[in-house]
Image (spheres, rainbow, N blue to C red):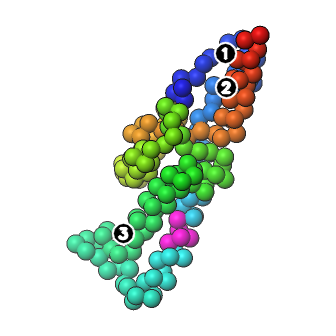
């Protein structure tokens, strides 16, 4: 049901727009991602730097290539764990919560751990290629899905609009049953 919205041509502009437009666009998702970047950077500094000092780690030491430094691998672990755990437990990261967004399954069912893992690990890894330009897919997709959303059958929605849409739809059903 999440994929297909019923079009109500008899409704006046605002109500019809609310019912049919709950998907979050690129701008609000970008702001949420920037907030999440600040949170991840803070977590990195709070967790990684004290551990490095405690265990006398050289974060610039690397295996095979500089990209595989201890600091880079630990930062990647914090990055992916943040997105996976926040989406699994809350259906939103702190940035999404601040923007009133949440991740839902396109089927309307509860998110599975495989969906979350696919979206937040594999999908984000793919979307991060080419200087993160693949996130721009959201701008051109009618359901405002990124590659990571399409791979995991998820969509990011405005939570407040979804609640309003549900109330309007239930009101329409009640009026039609009279």
| Tag 1–tag 2 contact (CB < 8 Å) | yes
| Dot placed on the residue nearer the N-terminal end, 3 or 1 | 1
The residue sitting at 47% across, 77% down in the picture is 48
At mark 1, the secondary structure is loop
Which residue is under mark 1?
8
Q: CA distance from mark 3 to mark 1?
A: 50 Å
Q: Residues within 10 Å of mark 2 (few under 14, many from 20)?
A: many
Is 141 magenta? The answer is no
Q: Residues within 10 Å of mark 1 (few under 14, many from 20)?
A: some
Residue 99 lies, in percent from the top left, at 66, 49
At mark 2, the secondary structure is helix
- Look at the image and tell me whether residue 148 can be seen: no
| Tag 3–tag 1 contact (CB < 8 Å) | no
Q: Nearer the viewer, residue 131 or 124?
A: 124
Q: Quadrant of the N terminus?
A: top right
The residue sitting at 63% across, 25% down in the picture is 20
- The part of the image, by quadrant, that contains residue 17 is top right
Residue 154 lies, in percent from the top left, at 48, 38
Q: CA distance from mark 1 to mark 2?
A: 8 Å
Question: Does 54 appear above or below 144?
Answer: below
Q: CA distance from mark 3 to mark 2?
A: 43 Å
| Dot placed on the residue nearer the N-terminal end, 1 or 2 | 1
Q: Which mark is residue 19?
A: 2
Q: Which mark is residue 73?
A: 3
- Look at the image and tell me whether residue 101 can be seen: yes
The residue sitting at 73% across, 29% down in the picture is 167
Q: Quadrant of the C terminus?
A: top right
Q: Main secondary structure of the magenta part?
A: helix
Tell me the magenta residue range. Answer: 40-44
Residue 45 lies, in percent from the top left, at 52, 75
At mark 3, the secondary structure is helix
Q: Nearer the viewer, mark 3 or mark 1?
A: 1
């Amino acid at each position: 049901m999440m994929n297909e919205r019923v079009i109500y041509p008899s409704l006046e502009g605002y109500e019809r727009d609310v019912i049919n437009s709950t998907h979050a666009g690129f701008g609000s998702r970008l702001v949420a991602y920037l907030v999440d970047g600040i949170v991840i950077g803070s977590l990195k500094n709070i967790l990684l730097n004290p551990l490095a000092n405690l265990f006398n780690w050289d974060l610039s030491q690397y295996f095979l290539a500089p990209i595989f430094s201890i600091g880079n691998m630990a930062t990647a672990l914090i990055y992916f764990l943040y997105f996976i755990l926040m989406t699994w437990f809350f259906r939103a990261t702190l940035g999404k919560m601040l923007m009133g967004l949440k991740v839902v399954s396109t089927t309307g069912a509860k998110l599975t751990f495989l969906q979350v893992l696919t979206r937040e690990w594999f999908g984000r890894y793919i979307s991060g290629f080419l200087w993160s330009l693949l996130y721009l897919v959201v701008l051109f997709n009618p359901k405002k899905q990124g590659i990571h959303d399409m791979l995991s059958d998820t969509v990011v929605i405005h939570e407040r609009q979804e609640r309003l849409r549900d109330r309007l739809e239930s009101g329409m059903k009640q009026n039609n049953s009279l």
